[in-house]
Image: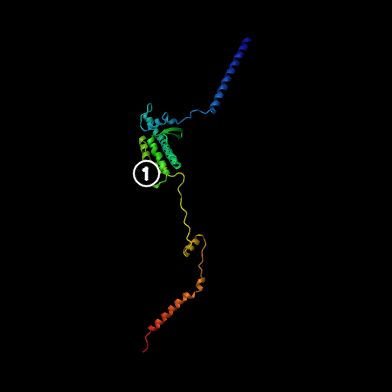
Amino acid sequence: MSSFFQLFLAWGLLLVFVLVLYIVDKVNVIYQGYAKPDLPQTYNDGLFGELVGKTLWDAMSGIPVPGVDTKFVSSLKPHYEPVLRQHIEQVFMEGYSHGKAGTAGVPTNNRIIPTPRGSIESWLPMHHLASIYQAGVDFSAKKPEDVLRIQQSLDQVTAMIYARIGVGLTEAYSATLLIHPEGEEESGQDLPPPEADETPAAAQLTHQETGEVLQPDLSSLNQTPLSATAPASASNNANMNLTEEAKPMPA
């Protein structure tokens, strides 16, 4: 009887121990689901591996990175081009918005860029970023005399960046970025009002456009003023006198 009781007690303790472990595990799962990490993850794109930030730029621009194969870096360059493009476009638009708001400053080297696989931290040299940012600030001023200079500066610095990483630039950035994004330019001007003293032809055209046709007033033709017929009568009498004077006298 005592051995059976001891066996029963051992099985009971084992079940209690398993139950405690199960409860603790469930509590941990629930806590991890609601708890927020203290330091947010800066990137989660596993395609680039440990290459992130300045290390990613150094590898793409040809600087040897310890522990990273050059063939692996070459295979990543087509995937790095969209990251680079987003970085450049964001810096330009940031300069444009800061220029419109009158709060132009200095851009930062690092920027989180979204990718199809998550996001990655991108880094660009400050002398390149400053030129791109300033191009956006200058373009926000809307001065026509500065457009050519902004275009040349933007295309030159972006061409230098692409040449640095060894990727071909198929389309100039000025073709897509030098467009005011907010629809601020007027689409057209109002037409001037019509003249008050329109000619009959103009009045007829105006009414034809509206579907109405004006009929000419013929009442004035039935009543000929004396002032208009008097000169004509005098002229006819004068012609008759000249004709009679021109006839030869009979012999």
When the figure is inspected, residue 16 is found, relative to residue 202, above or below; the finding is above
Residue in the picture at 55% in, 26% down:
31
Instruction: List the single residue furthest toward the right.
Output: 1
Q: Quadrant of residue 157?
A: top left
Instruction: List the single residue furthest toward the bottom.
Output: 251
Instruction: List the single residue furthest toward the front.
Output: 102
Q: Nearer the viewer, residue 167 or 38?
A: 38
Q: Nearer the viewer, residue 71 or 199?
A: 199
Residue 206 in picture, x, y percent from top left? 49, 61
Residue 4 in picture, x, y percent from top left? 62, 12
When the figure is inspected, residue 197 is found, relative to residue 4, above or below; the finding is below
Circle 1 crowding by C-alpha within 10 Å: few under 14, some 14–19, many from 20: few
Residue 172 in picture, x, y percent from top left? 38, 42
Residue in the picture at 40% in, 40% down:
134
Residue 118 in picture, x, y percent from top left? 47, 33
How many numbered marks have been drawn onto this rendered protein structure? Answer: 1
Tag 1, which secondary structure? helix
Quarter placement of the N terminus: top right
Q: Nearer the viewer, residue 88 or 65?
A: 88
Amino acid at dot 1: Arg
User: What residue is shown with label 1?
Assistant: 149
When the figure is inspected, residue 196 is found, relative to residue 53, above or below; the finding is below
Quarter placement of the C terminus: bottom left
